[in-house]
Every structure is written in C-alpha cells, then in structure tokens.
Image: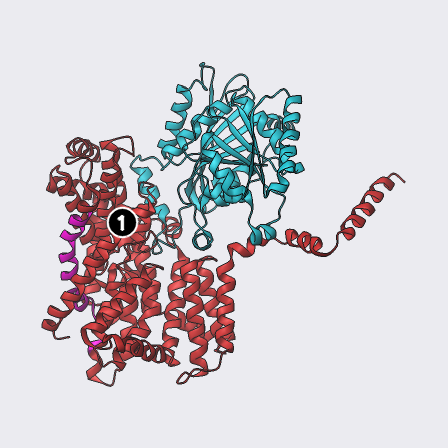
Amino acid sequence: MADHPARLQSLQNRIRVNGITGLKRVMTLGSWLNLYFFWEKKWFFIAMVVGAFMLEMPLPEGLSPEGLIILTMSVVAVILFVTEPVPLPTVALLIIIGQVVLMGHDSSEVAKSLVTDSVLFIAGSLMLAVAVVKQKLDKRIAWLIVRMTGTKTWRVCFGITVVSGILASFVGEHTVAAMMLPVGITLITLTSDDPRKVRNLAAVLLFSIAYGASVAGIGTPSGGARNAIMIGYWKEFFYDPTNPETYKFMVSYVDWMVHAYPMFLIQVPFVTAILFWTFRPEYRDLSRAVVKLRALIEEEGSMKAADWMSIAIFFLVLLGWITISGDIGMGTVAVAGAAVFLIAGLVRWEDINSGVNWGVILLYAAAISLGLQMKETGAAQWVAEGFLAFLSPLGANEGFGLWAAVSVLTTGVTNMMSNGAAVAVLGPIVLKVSVVANESPIIIGYITAISSSFAYLTVVGTPACTIVYASGYLKATDFLIVGWKMAIASSVIMLVAAKLYWPLLGV
Amino acid sequence: MVNWNGAPGMSAAEIEARKDRFRILVCIDGSDECYQSLRYAARLGGGVDADIVLLYVRPVDQGLRSGGLQVRVARENMLKWGLELPGIQYLKKGRDMLKELGIMAGDEWREEVAHTDVNGDPLGDNKINYINEQGKMVVLKLKVATDIATGILEQWELGPYDLIILGASGRWKGMGRSFWDPAVAEKVAIHAPCSVLVARDLEEGHGHLICTDGSDEAMEMVRSDAELASRCDCPVSLMSVALDVEEEPDAKANVEKAEAMLKELGIEVKETIIRVGNPVDEIIEVGPDYSLIVVSESGKSGLQRFFMGSVAFKVMENAHNSVMIAR
C-alpha cells in the first residue's frame, strides 16, 4: 500500500499531460523531439531531398537512366563534401551503398573498383609521410636553412619557402608542413613570448611554410593525391594498349615533372613577395631567434647512421618513382618504400597506424570509383556538353578561354573541399569537355590538377594550410586576406606557362 | 536552471558542495574583449564562495582536412621541440591578471594538475586547479572539442556554472549567414543552461539595466540578477517597455512590482525607466549608458523561437554593449 501516493502522483501527471490541448500539445511534442539534431544535420537532409528530387525528375535529353543515378550521387556527394553535416568517410560509405543498391552493381565488383594504383599510391605516400616526419630530420633542415639565409626576416622566409617547396614537391605538402611547423613556431616564440606582438611575423613565417608547400605540391606526381588521381584518370579514359597513338596518355613521373616543376619554381619568389606585401612583419631581423635556434640544433650532435639511412631510403623511393614506376606502378613503389622503412626499424607500425587517417583513403577510393562511373554511364559527357553550351556565349568554349574557365571552376571547387576530392569529382567532366571541344585532354588535365592546389583562401583548402592552422597562431580570415592575391598570381602564372611553355614540349 | 547531477568521478558530498558555490566560466581566446570580461568576472567572483574557471577551447586535431596525415603527427613533432599547445599562453596571462587584481592574494594557493584523455585527440584536456584554504578555486582549463561552442557547453556539464562570460567576437550574423556557420556566442547563448553574458566593451561601474515584462520568469530573473549585481556593488536600474500607449500602465506596474520585490531583499533600485515602442529598439537605445543589459529568456520553446524570434536574442544580437541572458 506504500506505493499509493506515488501511483496517485503518476495518475495526476498523466491527466495533466492529457489536459494540454491543441497547439500547446503540439509544442510539447516538439520540445520532446530533439530539434537541434535536425538543425545540425540540416545539410544532410537537404542533400537527400535534392537527391530524391533528381531521381524522380523526368530524364533529361541525352542522359541515360544510369547516368542520371550517377549524376545524382555526385551532386549529393558534392553537397556533403562541402557542408560536412556527417563525418566525411560516411560519404564514401554512402557512395558504395548507392552503387550497389541504386545502380544494381554486384557488391564484389563495386569492392574491386575501389582499389586502383592511384589509391594504392595515396595510401603508400601517407605511410611514407609519417615515416619521414618521425625521422627527426626537421632540425637538420632548419639548420641548413638558417645557415644559408642569414638573419634578415625576408631571407629566412624565402629560405623556408624554397626548402619547404623542394621537399614538398617530392614527399607531399602535408609531410613538409608537419615537419617545418615546429621550426616556424620556434622562430616566433624565440622572437617574442607575447603572440600579439609577433602576429604579422607569425603569419609570414607560417604562410611561408604552408604556401611554399602548397605551390610545390604540383611539381611531381608524388606532391599530392590529386596528381596521382589525374594520372589514373588519363590512363582509364584514353589509354588503349592496342593503339600506339594513345601511349602518350600513360604520363610518367618524369613527364609530369617536366611539365609542372618549372611552374612551381616561378611561383616561389611571388609567395615571399605577396606575403611581405600583405603582412609587413614587426621585425626586419631575426638574429636573436636565429642564434638561439642554432644553439638548440647544435645540441643534437652530428648526423647518425639512422639519419643517413632514412635519407638513403627516401632517395631510393624517389629513384623508383622516376625509373620503374611506369612498369610496376607508382603505388607499388610508394608501398615498397613504406615497407622498407618498417623493415629497417626506422618507424613503428603503431606510429603509422595512428598517424594516417585511413578514412581519407576510403574517401578517395569511393570518389575515384564514382568518377569512373561518371565516364562509363555517359553522365560526364552529358555534363561536359552542358558546360560547353553554357560557356559558348562567353566565347570560352575553346582554346585559351576554355583553359581559363576550367581553371576558375577548379579553383572555386577546391576552395570548398579537399583538393583531391575536387580532382576526383571534376576530372571526368573536364576530360570529357576537352574531348567534346577538341582540346588536348593532357593540357586540360594538367590545368585541373594544378588549379586544384590554388586553395589558398580557406583553412580546409589544402593539407598544409590545415596543419599550420593547428598551431593556433593564425586566424581563418588571414587566409582570405592573402589567399586571393596568391590565387590570382598562381592562375596567371599557370595560364602563361600553358600558353608559352607547354607548346615547346609538344603537348 | 537545468539540474546538474554531477560529473564522472565525483562523490555525492563533492557534488552538493559544488552546487552551493558561485561558479563563473570565462571563455578566453586571447582577445582584448576576453580580458575585459575577466576583469569583470574577478569583480563578481571576489567572494570566498566564488570560483573562477578560465577556459580555452582548442579544436580537436583531425586528419581528414590535412590530406590524410593526422594533425597529431605535426602536434607530436611540435611537442618534441618543447613547444606549448596553443592557448596556454593566453590562460597564463589570464591567471597573472587575476593575481594582479588581488583575486589570488596570499600564498596558501595549492596547485593541482589534471589530465583527461579525449577520444580522437592524443593530448586530451588539461587543467590546473589553484585552491586556497577556504576552498576557493581558480582553474585554468585547456579543452579540446569539435568546435568552440560545443567545448564551452560540454564544460558546463562537468561542473555547473552560474554564469558563462564570453566576448562577442564581432561574428554575430543574420539568419542567412548563420545558416552556414553559426556564431559561437549565439550557439552558447541558446543552449547553455545557465546565464550567459556576451561582453562588448564591458566596463565596470555603470550598473545593470534589468528589463522585465512582468512574467514569472522575468521576476525570477530580476531577483537573481539583482543578487549578482550586489556581488559587485553595481547599481541596478529597472526597465519595462510597453508596446503602445494603452499598455503603459501595465509596464509601469511591472516595474513597480519588481522594485517592491527588490526592496524586500534590501536591494536599492537606482532608477526606473518606462518606454513605449518596439522592445528591442528601445532597450538597445537605452543600453549604452549601462555596463550591461540584462534580459530574461522568455519561456518559448525551440520551435516557437524558430518562427517568432525572441526579444532577448534580438537584443543580444544587435545591442552596442554587453548583454546578459539570465536563466
């Protein structure tokens, strides 16, 4: 009988709830649902509604039903890439599910289509990146820089940009940003303890690292995932083993370097000039900081056997890419390099495992698979024709105008999502555009891959920017202030090179 | 105020003891605004029964954006060089400021360092507690979270706070922009279970302007804020806005009701203001003469607010000086 009062209470409660009528009752119900969940995830639902709407709309002329499904998946994926309502690898999972459920492909076939040489290359380079960062060579590199440059601020910054750039062109920009970030911050903190007194100096030094690495990412295929993705697309789209005419679409490591490396070298002085023009550092001379940094580095002692060993392995990998990657694939060389680092005991698997974000590999795999489907179903062709029809009134449907249009499109897209994903999504479309417009797919492909590194405007644009942003010294608006100048300078340099330099190579 | 049921690893006695304390959370981001608000917090939290917690939220290091190489690789490399995490400098500056202001006077302060692991970040949360013999606490906390607003709100869960102070970062945006990127202050103000003070040029000594509409919630708020104001000896002014001339007597009655209540509590009201017109515009116009405007959150639910907006949030968004939403 003791529970009588409690039961009475609960009965009263129930009556009270039932007593609420009309609008008020709806409101009560509303407060039970967690509306904020829907508000946070609104872009996911918007993307799904857009997708459902596209699937239900009448088939546009010239597009196959499969093409419409793939196009829908691409649009939904792009919305999710840009707005990120769900963790990005989720998008990869959704693409896989979509291919099986909506397209009716066999599950095993979809799984097989995920791993290509490009994906293997991305995975291998990331493992190599962790291995290289773990070698503690950063202090040696810092020593090299300050020995060459002296103590003037602009010379130190230029030195950092050059060295970051040359390294990044081979080992990838994220590796270099991770290695060089402590060098930059050490120089800043040794100059002044108060971050607000060295705001502009911090900006110049850190952007020298980030933009130096970013402009270099175009230099070689191993500079960034986007380059490997484009090489993969060229091969898948145009290479035909029976037709010697198409052999030029098997772009080798050296081919790429010949086309793109000079472009990186021309950009380097512009990086330093633009940074100094924009930020005007508080200190013209860093002698105090440089002297302390030298003392710090000299504590390390001379180079050890392990240091030489890791440098040697790295040069072997580089040699492998240059000489034999045409036969065994760039991905295989990268994976072999990671294996050698592990065998030599220079890096622990645990470090690699926690240092690589495996979700990114899944994401690239799914994006490339979607890109290839764009081509197979004719969706890429359809979008390409629409794009050209849109450009023709502007006179940009051929020649130089088209190049500029492709570059602007890629720059716009890459600032909103990771540059690898931008190339994976745009690649099939622009390559089809080049075919329809009777332009060289090689030129258009290079323009797309190179423009995708012009993501200077946002923190999320390029890996190097994201990493230096983690230092806490930069504001998101700093990227906007200096980024647009960099984007214009880089675009102009690239288009001039495409017009004057590439023809000399007979593209 | 939402009931707080303790954080993991606390005994029942600790939980009860903590509920009795007056706890202020000051969000530090290195701006002038945040140190101004810290100065104000020091004034409010000068008593023995008050704790001041300085919080810096660092975005969690994640590798999707950095091209597949985890930012932690760079972070570990930085630590190897002996570099501090971002934010530590700012927190230490805040602590030194509290020392200067005499909050941490005496040398019986005990120092405790604590670390909590956080999923997805190798370095986790770090904090330093300074506790004196009377049990007064000053805490420096470096927290990681997916975004800043989430970090601040999570911090509330770990220990109830009576007041969250954060600087307006000039990032208040209209509905269109906030659809893309909600401002931190906005998100915290909407979701925090306690009072939130958004500081803009927060100056001491000009008094509190308390706005009331006569509702029960508002009366409760008037009482709690008047107590707060008495902590810093700030003069209190009452204001009510009538929508049109006919309602003016109602507004007058509201103010008088509040004034009578405060008199009973022994708190003197410096002046009373009655205005006619749009509440948001009138409050914003009168506001700059005071240190801060105090408004109560109306009883509207999320859905109602979504469609109709709320005076409190509009004032917070558009005012030229500091605004506190009292709960």
Q: Kindly identify the amino acid type of the residue bearing the numbered disc 1.
A: Ile
Which segment did they paint magenta?
A248-275
Q: Colour of chain B?
A: cyan
Q: Foreground residue, A62 or B320?
A: B320
State the quadrant of the C terminus of chain B.
Answer: top right
Q: Residues within 10 Å of mark 1 (few under 14, many from 20)?
A: some
Q: Colour of chain A?
A: red
Name the magenta segment's main secondary structure.
helix
- Which chain does the numbered disc 1 sit on? A
Q: Foreground residue, B15 or A110?
A: B15
Q: Foreground residue, A206 or B169?
A: B169
Task: Please name the residue that numbered disc 1 is placed on.
Answer: A481
State the quadrant of the N terminus of chain B.
Answer: top right
Image side of residue A5 versus residue A133, left or right = right
The local secondary structure at tag 1 comes to helix
Residue B25 to residue A384: above or below: above
| Residue shown at 18% from the left, 73% from the top | A400
Residue A412 to residue A4: above or below: below
| Residue shown at 12% from the left, 38% from the top | A152
Image side of residue B235 versus residue A110, left or right = right
Residue A56 visible in rendering: yes
Q: Say how many tags the image has.
A: 1
